[in-house]
Amino acid sequence: MNTSSLSASSGDVEVLTALVIGHYEELKDGNPPREHGFRWRMIQRDRNAVYRVEGRGRWYIKIPRHADVRPVRRELQGAAMLAAGASRDYLLPILTRGGQSPPYLLTSEIQGRQLNLALYRACFLPVASLRRETLAAFSNLGHAVGRLHEQFPSSEMLPTDRALRKLPWLEFDADEQETLRRAEEARVPVHGNLGLRNVLTASSRVGIIDFENFGVGSAYDDLSAVASQLALTSAVDVLPKAFVRRALDAFVNSYRTHRPFDVDLLAACVGIRIRAFQARAARTAGIPRIAGIPVRLARVERLRRQLGAGPGPMLPLS
């Protein structure tokens, strides 16, 4: 879920909570209430109905369309756990509230640019200050994820439902099965869907959103999600590979100050995610794109083979 900023009083919170509970079925079906002067805009409608709401502040409301309480439970647990270990370089929503009967999530805005867009902007605009800020954001992301993984999972936490093992369209060979077995040896709290679009950044600070898949999993679930996106970005001919590699270095080098990891194992997990990208591209009509730019699948395959031989140019981790 995307988020946005709060300049509102607590009055919005109580009114919106009452509106969600009182108009729950209508909101699930895409029919928001009109009273109290709030401006509602539906921004997503699949397994969830997600609204951006403007009143005295800006809010995001997520309602599971099948009344499943687990996504809300995951969201609240993940946001609370990251907030517990947050530093001043982490962007927090001013308020996050949720209910389980009926299930809903209400969160205030985090102002910022999605980190994938910040990365592409820094790639296309070779301004030194902009690139320093972007690298600092990846460093701060490494710290945030490392602090999350340092924490001890509670007995109330569900397993993540987007583990590396659950990637669609893949059948794992014996080597990949062994990779997954090794990756799953250490169980930690994980975000579960750490796409760069789920990271917001402003002035090098970062905030992580959309904890719907939060739970207990492998640290490599999160690490390989970030590293594979950067590896795939390096496969785009027109983007500066050296700068993308520096972003990856900034992320993992900050992460390892909190928790050690196996570079070879990470490379193997990234290779699995790249194979999933290839499988998805094979099922989709048209030319696959990264950062909106067509990418040659032969280049992606070459990258995957390099990773299969161990950390290469795209994982220059010291």
Image (cartoon, grey):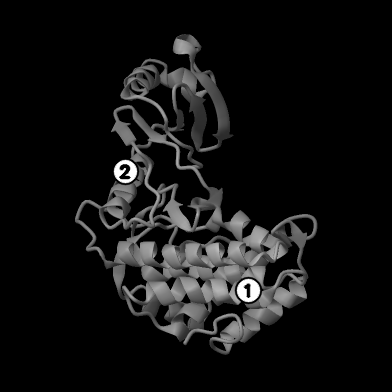
**In this view of the protein, can residue 200 be seen by the observer?**
no
Q: In this view, does 233 lie to the left or right of 228?
A: right
- Residue nearest the viewer, comparing 38 with 154: 38
Q: Name the residue under label 2.
A: 76
Are there few (<14), some (14-19), or many (20+) residues within 10 Å of tag 2?
some
The tag on residue 187 is none
Vertical side of 147 occupied by 94: above or below: above
* Amino acid at the residue labelled 2: Leu
Across and down, in percent, residue 240 comes to 70, 73
Q: What element carries label 1?
A: helix
Q: In this view, does 53 lie to the left or right of 284?
A: left
- Residue nearest the viewer, comparing 16 with 306: 16
Q: In this view, does 210 lie to the left or right of 287?
A: left
Q: Name the residue under label 1.
A: 243
Are there few (<14), some (14-19), or many (20+) residues within 10 Å of tag 1?
some
Q: Quadrant of residue 220?
A: bottom left
Q: Quadrant of residue 305?
A: bottom right
Vertical side of 176 occupied by 170: above or below: above
Question: What residue is rendered at 49% in x and 70% in y?
Answer: 224
Across and down, in percent, residue 81 comes to 28, 53
Question: What residue is rendered at 35% in x and 67% in y?
Answer: 146
Spatial CA distance of label 2 from label 1 is 35 Å
- Residue nearest the viewer, comparing 301 with 228: 228
Vertical side of 9 occupied by 98: above or below: below
> Residue placed farthest to the left in the image?
155
- Tell me, yes or no, whether the two marked residues, 2 and 1, touch with CB atoms within 8 Å: no
* Amino acid at the residue labelled 1: Phe
Vertical side of 137 occupied by 198: above or below: above
Across and down, in percent, residue 216 comes to 31, 60
Q: What element carries label 2?
A: helix
Across and down, in percent, residue 113 comes to 56, 49
